[in-house]
Image (cartoon, rainbow, N blue to C red):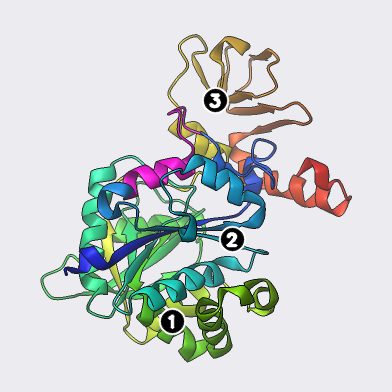
Amino acid sequence: MSCLDRFWAVIPAGGAGTRLWPLSRAASPKFLKDLTGTGRSLLQGTWDRLEPLVGDRVVVVTGTAHADAVRDQLPGLPAEQLLAEPSPRDSMAAIGLAAAMLERRDPEALLGSFAADHVITDPEAFRRCVRDAVVVADQGYLVTIGIEPTHPATGFGYIRMGEVLGDGPACLVGQFVEKPDARRAAEYVASGRFRWNAGMFVVRATVLLDLLATWHPALAAGLREIAADPSLLPERWADLEKIAIDHAVAEPAADQGRVAVVPGSFGWDDVGDFHSLATLLPRAADTGEVRVLGDEALVRALDATGIVVPASGRHVAVVGLEDIVVVDTPDAVLVTTRQRAQDVKAVVDALKAEGLDELV
């Protein structure tokens, strides 16, 4: 059996997409929505590009509140391969639970973790990159996919590539770098030695859990215990450490030469805010430079640029404004600029602080 025959896709489907408020809410997060006008949600798009690689060897990890919606959107997903978290415990617990379940099913299993809410514009190039990563992961490395940067983005983390492994294309990871300022981002891109960190990891299930046990033994033991007896999930889940996979495993393992990076040249976006969403939408036929997510007939634009989401069914008119963001929903309206799109999260934080949870 080849390593690709032992490979499973894990799709963590969590988060509320707060920078896409009020379009994305806790009860209806962005991964369940069609944000690119394809007729498929981001979650369904993720399934579509993974299916040619793995068939139905897919595990989806989501919150209990979204489990029914995930089942509805992915009718081809076997019931036992949907794992529902009682509460959010960050990416390490979610991916680690899937790894522990797969380890018990097949001690030789490999997995790749691919977020449910990303957009990839060249699925075949993505799949070629994943195949390369699986081969390297089968040698015992934790492998990440580093996206070739197209501009000096400050909203992504970066990966510094080290020495080439064998004949390539994989390299050792020299360093994971947090989101840089504009000057450092420009230096990273100009050097040609850095890739965007898309949070995609490919690894043997047992290797991931053994690495986790090195730095977070209680978390690794708890995940393996739940996998051995799934009835313990409701009781033990809340006690598991809440930590991201980057901090729990990837960064310390990179310091020991255990992490490799495979460069990816496909188009990628994490649809993190309305600024990035606007770049993914085609120009509307009758609105000039304004991009529309939804019914274009509801939008009137004159001497304006930006993005409009007419989600309430009302008509929206924009006149004489540059790089505007207008999101009109039945119970909330957002007006900002693309330059301030990252700050939308602060509105959500303020609404939560005021106890207006029904709006978030």
**Which of the two discs, 3 and 1, sits closer to the camera?**
1
Residue highlighted by disc 2:
84
- The quadrant of the rendering that contains the N terminus is bottom left
Q: How many residues crowd mark 2 within 10 Å: few (<14), some (14–19), many (20+)?
A: some
Location of residue 289 in the rendering, given as x and y in whole percent from the top left corner:
49, 19
Residue 256, image quadrant? bottom left
Location of residue 352 in the rendering, given as x and y in whole percent from the top left corner:
82, 51
Left or right of 18 on screen, residue 182: left
Residue shown at 39% from the left, 46% from the top: 47
Above or below 220: residue 113: above
Left or right of 16 on screen, residue 183: left
Residue shown at 51% from the left, 33% from the top: 34
Residue highlighted by disc 3:
293
Calculate the distance from the C-alpha at mark 2 to the C-alpha at mark 3: 30 Å
Q: Are marks 3 and 1 in contact (CB under 8 Å)?
A: no
Could you tell me which secondary element the residue under label 3 belongs to? loop
Q: How many residues crowd mark 1 within 10 Å: few (<14), some (14–19), many (20+)?
A: many
Residue 209 tag number: 1
Magenta extent = 35-50
Q: Earlier in the sequence, mark 1 or mark 2?
A: 2
In the rendered structure, does residue 311 fall within the stretch colored magenta? no
Calculate the distance from the C-alpha at mark 1 to the C-alpha at mark 2: 20 Å
